[in-house]
């Protein structure tokens, strides 16, 4: 079993950022019957999505989230000794986007920086990596997780076009003496690698002339089966490792895949609505960063006044699934912002 | 959670009608997928969730592709010993 318990970590803050532009599924979608739109909105739970218009990259959203977080948390930039960027929508294949972000954020050269290529399961994986770094001697790690899935969906694909929004997140993880560890379960089943895939554009098929091959393909029923078979044991195995029961956990921050699947999982796992923030209506499925967004826009929408336990849950592309049972104290900085195209032009280093 | 009680054929047809947002008068065991408006991709997801919820039945991709009529769905119940005949 791929499980681990890591102590002495604290979340100093979480900052999320979405593009300013809103796509209203009911008003802005063309080529769909109104009845179809209403059905999708009701089933998937996605009414609006913040989209990047193809110009804003996940790195831009993460940059803004990170700058805001660093300023508000009072971290000296020189004190950050680790930068992790989790994404499947990098600026370039080469160099790692984390190196660009390292420059853009003006971090010290005494700082490790690397990308992790995971999607929907990326946030618990990133937190695990950050906690591993803290436990191996790093003091302050900035975990950035951003995706722009609205860019890789095809307007002709009725299964995916209305679902996805874009988001960037920054999470500040620091060393702090603590006896309560964070618990992680990280799993993989590569048999389902083709269930969620962009077939072309990588080095196996770089220049495919068929544009459709550069868009996302999703096997909806395959993913549904994967989710309902894998997520319930993921939750119970993580609880068992921590010697906890469902009712001991304040919040379950799910990857916001779609409301129908989330409701089914909640029922199957015996979770109450108050334990599971659902933010799909205003943001859509933003991939792995949706877990952090569920914290800033769900768990902490009303500021918390006491420490809470949160199980972070990611599942999807890979196929890969992950859980992290962490704690969040009331002093942690919580931020949310929007990025406009004007602001992008002002602060981007072209 | 799961109600593992077997259902009769008429109960099953009424259940499928509810899942596909139609009435039991509109469908019979012979009705084909293309003749039921609500048996679209979203209807399939609802069906999968209901089968899991009620009988812990999970249909894999091959099974899903082999289903094209209400009778095929009844066969799924039959195979899983939850259709009382």
Image (cartoon, coloured by chain):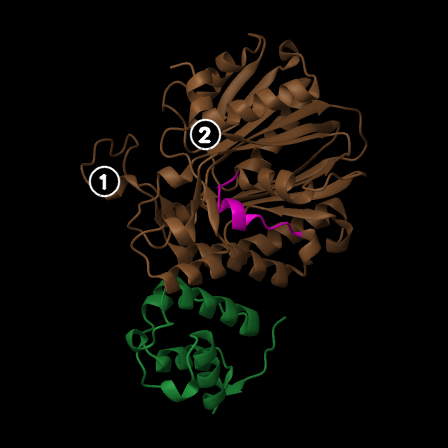
**Residue range highlighted in magenta:** A276-288
Q: Is residue A92 magenta?
A: no
> Which residue corresponds to the image point at 41% horizontal and 54% vertical from the top-left?
A26
Residue furthest bottom in the image: B85
Residue behind mark 2 = A58
> Which residue corresponds to the image point at 73% horizontal and 36% vertical from the top-left?
A328
Tell me if B2 is positioned left or right of A10 in this view: left
Label 1: how many Cα within 10 Å (few below 14, some 14–19, many 20+) = few
Q: Main secondary structure of the magenta part?
A: loop
Identify whether A323 is placed above or below A57: below
Q: Colour of chain A?
A: brown
Residue behind mark 1 = A211
Mark 2 vs 1, N-terminal side = 2
Residue B81 in view here: yes
Label 2: how many Cα within 10 Å (few below 14, some 14–19, many 20+) = many
Tell me if A135 is positioned left or right of A55 in this view: right
Parent chain of label 1: A
Disc 2 secondary structure class: helix
| Disc number placed over residue A98 in the picture, else none | none
Tell me the quadrant of the picture where the N terminus of chain A can be found. Answer: top right
> Which residue corresponds to the image point at 47% horizontal and 35% vertical from the top-left?
A118
Q: Is residue A281 magenta?
A: yes
Tell me if A219 is positioned left or right of A330 in this view: left
């Amino acid at each position: 079993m791929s499980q681990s318990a890591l102590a002495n970590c604290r979340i100093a803050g979480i900052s999320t950022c979405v593009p300013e532009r809103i796509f209203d599924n009911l008003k802005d979608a063309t080529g769909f019957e109104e009845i179809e739109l209403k059905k999708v909105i009701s089933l998937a739970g996605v009414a609006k999505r913040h989209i990047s218009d193809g110009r804003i990259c996940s790195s831009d959203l993460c940059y803004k989230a990170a700058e805001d977080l660093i300023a508000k948390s009072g971290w000296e930039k020189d004190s950050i000794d680790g930068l992790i960027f989790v994404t499947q929508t990098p600026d370039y294949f080469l160099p790692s986007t984390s190196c660009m972000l390292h420059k853009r954020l003006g971090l010290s050269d005494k700082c490790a920086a690397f990308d992790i290529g995971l999607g929907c399961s990326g946030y618990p994986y990133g937190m695990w990596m950050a906690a591993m770094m803290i436990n191996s001697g790093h003091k302050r790690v900035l975990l950035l997780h951003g995706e722009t899935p609205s860019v890789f969906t095809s307007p002709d694909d009725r299964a995916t076009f209305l679902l996805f929004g874009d988001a960037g997140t920054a999470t500040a993880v620091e060393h702090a003496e603590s006896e309560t560890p964070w618990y992680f379960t990280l799993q993989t089943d590569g048999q389902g690698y083709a269930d969620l895939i962009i077939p072309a554009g990588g080095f196996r098929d770089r220049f495919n002339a068929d544009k459709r091959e550069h868009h996302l393909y999703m096997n909806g029923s395959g993913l549904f089966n994967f989710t309902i078979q894998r997520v319930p044991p993921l939750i119970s195995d993580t609880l068992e490792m921590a010697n906890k029961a469902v009712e001991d956990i304040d919040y379950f921050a799910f990857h916001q895949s779609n409301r129908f699947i989330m409701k089914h999982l909640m029922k199957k796992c015996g979770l109450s609505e108050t334990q599971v923030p659902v933010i799909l209506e205003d943001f859509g499925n933003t991939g792995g960063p949706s877990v952090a967004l569920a914290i800033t826009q769900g768990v902490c929408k009303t500021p918390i006044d006491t420490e809470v336990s949160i199980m972070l849950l990611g599942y999807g592309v890979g196929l890969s699934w992950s859980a992290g049972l962490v704690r969040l104290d009331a002093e942690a900085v919580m931020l949310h912002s929007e990025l406009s195209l004007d602001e992008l032009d002002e602060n981007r280093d072209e | 959670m799961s109600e593992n009680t077997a259902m009769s054929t008429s109960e099953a047809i009424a259940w499928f009608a509810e899942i596909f947002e139609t009435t039991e008068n509109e469908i019979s065991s012979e009705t084909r997928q293309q003749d039921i408006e609500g048996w679209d991709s979203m209807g399939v997801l609802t069906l999968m969730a209901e089968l899991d919820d009620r009988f812990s039945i999970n249909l894999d991709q091959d099974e899903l592709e082999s289903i094209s009529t209400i009778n095929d769905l009844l066969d799924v119940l039959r195979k899983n010993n939850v259709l009382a005949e």
